[in-house]
Amino acid sequence: MTEQISVEEYAAKARVFLDANAEKKESRKKFVWGEGSDNVSMFEERSKAAEEDMLQRAKAWQAKRFDNGFAWITGPTEYGGAGLTVAHERAYNQVEREYKTAPLGVFQIGLGMVAPTILDHASQKARDLYLRKMWRADIVGCQLFSEPGAGSDLASVQAKAEKDGDEWIITGQKVWTSGAQFSDIGEIICRTDPGLPKHKGLTGFIVDMKAPGVEIRPLRQMTGGASFNEVFFNEVRVPDDHRLGEVNNGWNVALTTLMNERASIGSADSGENTMYTRLLEMIRHYDLDQDPIVREMLADLYINTKVAGYTSQRATDKMRAGQMPGPEMSIGKMALVNNQKKMNDLVAHILGAKLVVDTGEWGTYAWSQLLLGAPGMRIAGGSDEVMRNIVGERVLGLPKDVGIDSKSAFRDIKVGTQKD
Ligand SMILES: Cc1cc2nc3c(=O)[nH]c(=O)nc-3n(C[C@H](O)[C@H](O)[C@H](O)COP(=O)(O)OP(=O)(O)OC[C@H]3O[C@@H](n4cnc5c(N)ncnc54)[C@H](O)[C@@H]3O)c2cc1C
């Protein structure tokens, strides 16, 4: 793969690769209401065996893409990337959409958030050790930020890391860790100096999720599934070369990750996805396509989804071009959850009681999984209220929070059950 390859040539190569390794979708096969699975859940409820099967299929497909130069298209060649442009990546994705391939959402946190942070902040040794393996899906990464007393106020984390020779010893609890149950490494933010103000005494590390002293306990959510966990660290040893950035500069490390998180959550679809098609067919099935209220709600949803998609695309393009995105990411995330709410309201308007009582009718009660999962997106990656604060302060220039606790030493602030 050379840097000179044109986008057209690259797309042609992609097609050759996909023809040889994946089955083409039947392009004329239209979605038919009542046929196939009616699953539209946001958080899949899977048995252990089904989760393992999904993971193995995703790993196999990602490894195949990587080995052929189609996994980390914009990544630096020294770590296994193809060193190409966003335009090449977009071209590949467009071609891949024509084929049936294993879903890769399971790598969203590891590749969308943790890997870019490793690339920006890790030691040469850690970059050499992990980036290629992560992008080849030999290993999976998770994000260990939130704690029972530190979510929106992430700078209040209390899990501590203490230096011991060439190692650090980590003790504390993290919570809401998506995918910890199948992750090999995690990016953790710990307090390394409680004598400094809360944003200043933090440090990031890459931690081995299989190391002695790491205990992972699943958390069941209201949809029935258990996609996230509590993770306990009991004197877990981490080598100093697994530190991310400078000691006590973990806030900047965390910001790199969060910036990428908002971008990946905010990448709203264009309104032509399966869910949207299902919704249209549902409207037709119930003979509501001439109903003025349904038409108005649908038009509102469609327009807003399209606009959000373009906004999020602008943010992603800026980041990939090495620029700092502006307010697009916060706005994109808020728009995504608002549009999800618009979709849910429309579904509830159409289905009414069928959404809460399982009558056995295809394509009705199944939507309750989506409605129950959707509130999670209002919280993940920065809650609605926090996003509004960001837009208010940084975009509209409203007065900032007084931040009375950001100047005192962390150990002097009363946070939850803090003992330091
Ligand atoms: C689906 C999902 C996946 C997640 N995955 C991960 C993961 O992989 N790793 C990880 O580390 N974490 C993860 N999280 C946790 C997530 O980052 C936190 O839930 C989030 O940061 C909010 O923190 P909290 O739950 O402690 O709520 P809190 O911060 O306690 O907030 C409670 C309420 O107070 C409001 N609030 C808080 N501060 C302010 C303020 N300054 N102004 C106005 N209102 C405010 C919030 O909007 C919210 O309504 C996940 C969460 C979800 C829902």
Image (cartoon, rainbow, N blue to C red):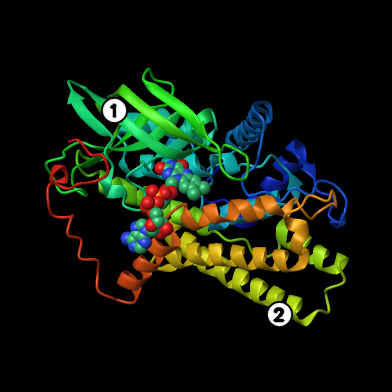
Residue 138 x, y percent position in the rendering = 53, 28
Looking at the rendered structure, the secondary structure element under dot 1 is strand
Residue 201 x, y percent position in the rendering = 18, 43
Above or below, 323 against 194 in this view is: below
Q: Quadrant of the N terminus?
A: top right
Q: Which residue is mark 2?
A: 296
Q: Residue furthest bottom?
A: 292
Above or below, 287 against 269 in this view is: below
- The amino acid type of the residue labelled 2 equals Glu
Residue 381 x, y percent position in the rendering = 44, 53
The residue at the point 56 percent across, 42 percent down is: 221
Lower position in the chain sequence, tag 1 or tag 2: 1
The residue at the point 32 percent across, 23 percent down is: 234
Q: Is residue 401 left or right of residue 291?
A: left
Q: Which residue is mark 1?
A: 171
In the image, the residue with mark 1 has its CB under 8 Å from the nearest atom of ligand 1: no
Residue 288 x, y percent position in the rendering = 83, 73
Using the rendered image of the protein, determine whether residue 411 is visible from the camera's viewpoint: yes
Q: In which quadrant of the rendered view does residue 117 lie?
A: top left
The residue at the point 41 percent across, 31 percent down is: 231
- The amino acid type of the residue labelled 1 equals Thr
**Are circles 1 and 2 on residues that touch, CB within 8 Å?**
no
Q: Is residue 121 left or right of residue 78?
A: left
Looking at the picture, tell me which residue is in the foreground, 156 or 372: 372
Q: Is residue 136 left or right of residue 394?
A: right
Looking at the picture, tell me which residue is in the foreground, 308 or 407: 407
